[in-house]
Image (cartoon, rainbow, N blue to C red):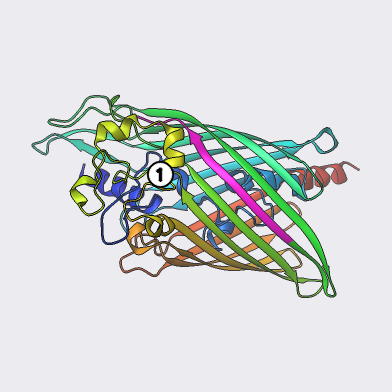
Amino acid sequence: MKKFFLSLAAVVCFGASAWAVDETMNPLITSMPSLSIAPDARAAGMGDLGVATEADFNSQYWNPAKYAYMYSKGGITANYTPWLRKLVSDIDLAYLAGFYNFGDLGGGIGASFTYFSLGDVALTNANGDKIMDVRPNEWALDLSYFRKLHEYVSMSVAVRIMYSDLNNGSNSSTAGATEMYPAWTMAADIALYYRQPLELPMGTSHLALGFTLKNLGGKMTYDKVTQNFIPASMNIGMSYELPCDKFNFLTFNVEANKMLVPSRKSRYTEGFDPNDENTWQMSQDAYSALNPAKGWFQSFADAPGGSKEEFAEVRWGAGLEYSYNKQFFARVGYSYENFYKGNRNYVTVGAGFHLSIVSLDVSYCIGLASSNPLDQTMRFTLGFDLAGIKDLVDNKKK
């Protein structure tokens, strides 16, 4: 059990904001924290951002509206991340995504499947006796529809079903512990994407803006009593691609992420006194009873530290991508989070190789905080262009 709780605590702390400013603990803990983990190597190589970057096969996770500007009519991708390897050796994240653009019929569809395994865990009783081996896991399945609204603007909507089983289907509790059950819920995403070409002497540049509201949905319960918020978020990004010449391009990206999750320590707590920290804690019953939609709006103004603390809840990412002939890529990025909000501060690097049929990307994380479990995290992405494969097959038939 010790390994299980260590793994879960690490995922929660580094998959969602965890500490408040002014040296006051104020965790934004959610169910399904794995949904906050960047699954693909390209985005991870640029500081975990992708809301406004150029469309790729993994746009389903970041902003499905980008699919409307894909150069290919369809594609699939597979992603793998060995997670928190500095703590444990068997936590893994797998992500599959794909899309198909109907073209003249208007719009297209995208889909993805996320699977997160917390490894093998031995459940024990209060005496330390082994009860059984379990393998806690979480998964999510989603479907999106995207289309262009204008030459430069597209939008998308997505629906998602998510499932979390931290006790691996075993509903029997250990001695003195609360029974745990699999939890599930549904959510929706809304996304917008703006991409406009700008003519320069050295070639055509592109300015892009992205906006998403993710995981707007119900709550999850593991004990059929306590209701837990899912990691809803608002994401805003900007990207600018600058051509150096006919073959060389530089793309500058910046992104902001705000969790739409209310604080447990809140200025909306009954009897709240800004000068008495003992009055900040919302009861578990009151927090569980909070309506999800109300919680999204409340998350912008409920922090006991006021606007300063609310601004500290914003996580920032910045990334640079260099490409040669749109085939060879080198990336670097930086992710910043306030020290008292989780301290996920790290530099990322990555590289990619793209052909007409297949693409391969890798990334590597370098933690800046001392003893950062995210340090040395690697991600791998393999993508296939279905249109390119079809053309290859058709040419062989001739």
Q: Secondary structure at mark 1?
A: helix
Q: Count every numbered label the image shows and give the total.
A: 1
Magenta: predominant secondary structure element?
Answer: strand
Q: Position of residue 232 (x, y in %)?
A: 47, 41
Q: Which residues are magenta?
A: 207-221
Q: Position of residue 98 (x, y in %)?
A: 65, 41
Quarter of the figure that contains the C terminus = top right
- Residue at left offset 31%, top offset 46%: 267
Q: Amino acid at mark 1?
A: Pro
Quadrant location of residue 203? Answer: bottom right
- Residue at left offset 50%, top offset 38%: 215
Q: Which residue is mark 1?
A: 33
- Residue at left offset 43%, top offset 53%: 82
Quadrant location of residue 30? Answer: top left
Quadrant location of residue 208? Answer: bottom right
- Seen in the picture, residue 136 relative to 378 is either above or below; the reply is above
- Residue at left offset 31%, top offset 27%: 181
Q: Is residue 129 magenta?
A: no
